Structures are given as structure tokens and as C-alpha cells.
Image (cartoon, grey):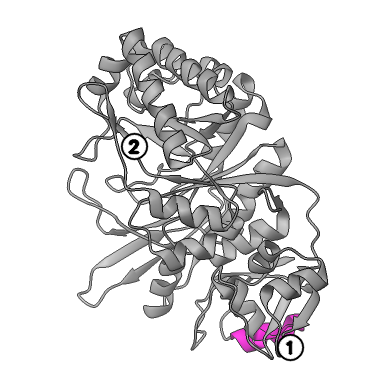
């Protein structure tokens, strides 16, 4: 495995010749489409196949898996161009294994709204351990606000992926409600009722556990929130299920701010089976242009978390999205546009922008001028920034990665994930 940075004058075909690889193979693992234009500074993942198979007449993905001893899921992971679907045709060349043999396994969780594009989700699910539909809510009276989640649960089952019920205090207005959280958490009886409603819904819908995400809690609710997590975990564990809890990206126990004060890492770690560190959104919609998840900031959060939590409980957050800011940035007025990471590269190609790489943040970025003369700045993720974050998982022996979100394609990232790690699922 290697990462290649596109130099001026290079093409997909010249890069293929450089590495002795079929250009089409490089295109498939990086999600490139005809006419295969590249941007200067673009990062490409280069993987070398150990085993190739040419599909014969009458063969299916299932028969190829049976005769080769390679699981269907692994064939899907090695061939992202299949889009998570089993259809193959005679003469098609499939990768059955890469030269890189992962020695460490991880679990992968990701979130998706009910309206996610099915083709996108199918392309990602082979790389997942868990799928978490977003989101069940808490009503003003402390009840459970339901979610149209059956389609996502059914899709996850097709890939042997466990679905988790996501419970948050996100309201109908798409904001987190401290008031609703206080209403439930301030009364142990209401906590018990909500926990029971969650468990009933989990059993009714066929979920395999829960993911708890109460944000913007004041410090006064920290202990009550941890106690509620403990109640829910006990009920789930009794049924052979787990409770995950999402944690704000803190760097110390006493970090001030409504986002942080209600999340006691130590107590929530004790009262859950796993945690997600929400290590993203330093660069955000209403903030100035910067990396969404600069590696130095991610590392500071992880360093603190490891003083309070065992590494085998930690999922490191990963941002599967990019931001495009129009300059000049004006505080209180500017609003960045969200887009996919491949979409960011497409913008660089369209406007002939040269992609830069911030070594401190370990994140790519570029500027371009649109058709109206406005200057834009874009920060996104690529194989280089993905590798930097994956190495933290590897270095510290973390349980896995948590993606916000599974709504957008990112073949190069998931191909790198598959090359570096064995992804845990019931089917392998």
C-alpha cells in the first residue's frame, strides 16, 4: 500500500504505469469516474492485488466466494465498484485479496438518516459493523419520538450489520433540547419509563443495542445523565445487547461550555459498553475556514479520553463530509456549504485548483474562484488525512471508528480501512 500525490502533468494512465497497475483498478478503489480527470495535489490510494479472479460464465459472487474461500463481504470490500451488490458478469476481473494483510481488527459504526440514498448506503455497509439510524427523540412529556427506520434496519441485516437505536434530545426543530433532557433526567421515575420505552422499541424493531446522544447538557445534569445511561445499559446487557454513548470532544474534565460540562467521561465510561468521541466539527458551518478534524485537536481529545476510559471502549469519530466557505469569512453572516469528500475533489478538478496539504492539521484544502468571481476555500478528508486518523486507532488499540456519517460515498477511505484493518461483522 502507498499513497500517491498527483503531480502536474500526471494522468491516471501514467500513474498506473508508474506502479505497474491497471489504471482501472486505481480508479475503482478511489471512486474515480470517466473521463478520469485528476487535480494537482490530489491523493490517490494505491493498493496491490495479491489474488485476482476473472468471472467465468455461470459463476456468481456466491459461487466465487465458496470456491475461493473468501467471504462475499470481503469480495465486496475489495471491489467497491460493485456498490455492495452481488451482480457480476463474465470477463469481469475481481480482486479477492490485497497484498496488505491486516493484523488488527476493528469495529465500524456509522449514522444515516432514513432518507439516505440506498445505492450509497449499500456501497458502505460491507465495511460496517453497526448502522445507527438517526434519530429517535425525547418528547416534551418524556416519551419516545419514533423514527421511520424499518428500511435501514432491513438493509443492514442483508450485510450482517447490527443496527443500533439512536436516542438523542434533538427536537422537531433540529436542535438539541436541554429542557427536555432536564425533564427526563431530573426524575428517576421518568428515567425508568424512558429506558423501558427504548428497550421495548429495540425489541420490536429488531435492533441490537442503543446509542445514547444527549448533547448540550449543563454540569448539574452530568451525574443524572450517567445514571440514566447505567439504567439503560443494565436493561440492554440483560438481553445480550450493548449501550454506546456519544461524548463531546473534551480535553480536560473541567472544560467549560455547555457542549462539554454535562459529559463526565469517567462516569459515562463506567455506565456504557462503548463511547464515540465526536472528534470533528472544529471547522463547522458557521465558523471560519479550517480543517473539520485537525489531527492535533483529535489527538488532544484522545489523549484526555485515555486517562478516563480504556482504549477498548473507544470509537474514534471520523467526518465523512467536507465544507466549502465563500470568502471573505464574516462572523455571524458566513455559512459554509457541506459536501462529500469526493465532491470536494471534483470541485478542485472543475476549477483547476491545486490541492494543498496542511502538515500540522494533516488535512487537504484548496481555494478556487467560481464563475461569479467569488473566492472559495474548501477543507476535506482524503487518503492522507484518513491514514493519520486510522493510525491513532492502530497506535492506541481503540475499539474502532465511528463515522458521521454514512450518507455520502468515500471509496478511497473505505478501501484504505479495509486494507489496514479486519472489519468485525457477524459474517466476517
Q: Please check the rendered image and state whether residue 16 is part of the magenta-colored stretch, yes or no.
A: yes
Circle 1 Cα neighbour tier, 10 Å, few/some/many (<14 / 14–19 / ≥20) = some
Give whichever of discs 1 and 2 has the lower sequence position: 1
Dividing the picture into quadrants, the one containing residue 82 is: bottom right
- The foreground one among 137 and 50 is 137
The residue depicted at 58 percent of the width and 17 percent of the height is 270
In the image, is residue 342 above or below residue 18? Answer: above
In this rendering, does residue 213 appear at all? no
Q: Which mark is residue 136?
A: 2
Q: Residue furthest front?
A: 204
Q: Secondary structure at mark 2?
A: loop
Circle 2 Cα neighbour tier, 10 Å, few/some/many (<14 / 14–19 / ≥20) = many
In this image, 384 relative to 371: left or right?
A: right
In this image, 227 relative to 168: left or right?
A: right
In this image, 418 relative to 374: left or right?
A: right
What stretch of residues is rendered in magenta?
Answer: 11-23
Dividing the picture into quadrants, the one containing residue 172 is: top left
Q: Check disc 1 and report the residue beneath it.
A: 56
Q: Secondary structure at mark 1?
A: loop
Q: Assign the magenta stretch its main secondary structure.
A: helix
In this rendering, does residue 394 appear at all? yes
In this image, 324 relative to 280: left or right?
A: left
- The foreground one among 331 and 217 is 217
Amino acid at each position: 500500500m502507498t499513497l500517491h500525490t498527483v503531480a502536474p502533468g500526471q494522468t491516471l494512465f501514467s500513474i498506473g504505469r508508474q506502479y505497474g497497475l491497471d489504471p482501472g483498478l486505481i480508479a475503482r478503489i478511489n471512486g474515480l469516474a470517466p473521463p478520469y480527470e485528476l487535480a494537482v495535489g490530489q491523493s490517490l490510494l494505491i493498493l496491490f492485488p495479491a489474488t485476482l479472479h476473472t468471472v467465468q460464465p455461470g459463476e456468481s459472487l456466491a459461487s466465487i466466494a465458496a470456491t475461493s474461500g473468501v467471504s462475499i463481504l470481503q469480495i465486496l470490500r475489495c471491489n467497491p465498484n460493485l456498490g455492495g451488490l452481488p451482480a457480476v458478469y463474465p470477463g469481469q476481473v475481481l480482486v479477492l485479496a490485497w497484498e496488505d494483510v491486516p493484523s488488527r481488527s476493528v469495529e465500524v459504526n456509522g449514522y444515516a438518516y432514513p432518507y439516505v440514498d440506498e445505492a450509497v448506503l449499500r456501497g458502505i455497509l460491507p465495511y460496517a459493523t453497526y448502522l445507527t439510524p438517526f434519530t429517535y427523540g425525547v418528547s416534551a412529556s418524556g416519551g419516545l419520538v419514533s423514527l421511520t427506520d424499518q428500511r435501514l434496519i432491513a438493509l443492514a441485516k442483508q450485510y450482517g450489520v447490527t443496527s443500533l437505536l439512536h436516542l438523542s434530545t434533538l427536537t422537531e426543530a433540529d436542535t438539541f433540547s436541554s429542557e427536555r433532557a432536564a425533564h427526563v433526567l431530573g426524575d428517576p421515575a421518568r428515567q425508568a419509563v424512558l429506558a423501558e420505552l427504548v428497550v421495548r422499541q429495540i425489541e420490536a424493531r429488531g435492533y441490537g443495542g442503543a446509542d445514547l446522544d444527549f448533547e448540550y447538557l449543563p454540569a448539574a445534569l452530568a451525574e443524572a445523565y450517567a445514571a440514566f445511561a447505567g439504567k439503560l445499559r443494565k436493561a440492554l446487557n440483560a438481553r445480550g445487547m450493548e449501550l454506546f454513548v456519544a461524548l463531546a470532544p473534551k480535553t480536560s474534565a473541567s472544560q467549560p461550555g455547555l457542549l462539554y460540562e454535562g459529559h463526565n467521561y469517567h462516569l459515562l465510561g463506567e455506565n456504557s459498553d462503548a463511547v464515540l468521541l465526536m472528534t470533528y466539527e472544529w471547522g463547522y458551518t458557521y465558523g471560519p475556514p479550517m480543517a473539520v478534524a485537525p489531527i492535533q485537536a483529535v489527538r488532544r481529545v484522545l489523549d484526555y479520553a485515555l486517562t478516563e476510559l480504556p482504549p477498548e471502549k473507544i470509537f474514534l469519530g471520523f467526518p465523512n463530509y467536507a465544507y466549502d466557505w465563500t470568502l471573505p469569512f464574516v462572523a455571524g453572516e458566513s455559512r459554509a456549504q457541506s459536501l462529500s469528500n469526493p465532491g470536494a475533489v471534483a470541485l478542485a478538478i472543475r476549477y483547476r485548483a491545486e490541492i494543498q496539504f496542511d502538515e500540522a492539521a494533516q488535512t487537504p484544502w484548496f481555494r478556487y474562484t467560481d464563475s461569479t468571481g467569488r473566492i472559495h476555500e474548501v477543507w476535506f478528508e482524503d487518503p492522507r488525512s484518513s491514514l493519520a486518523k486510522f493510525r491513532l486507532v492502530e497506535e492506541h488499540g481503540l475499539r474502532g471508528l465511528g463515522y458521521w456519517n454514512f450518507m455520502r460515498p468515500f471509496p478511497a477511505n473505505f478501501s484504505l480501512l479495509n486494507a489496514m484493518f479486519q472489519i468485525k461483522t457477524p459474517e466476517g
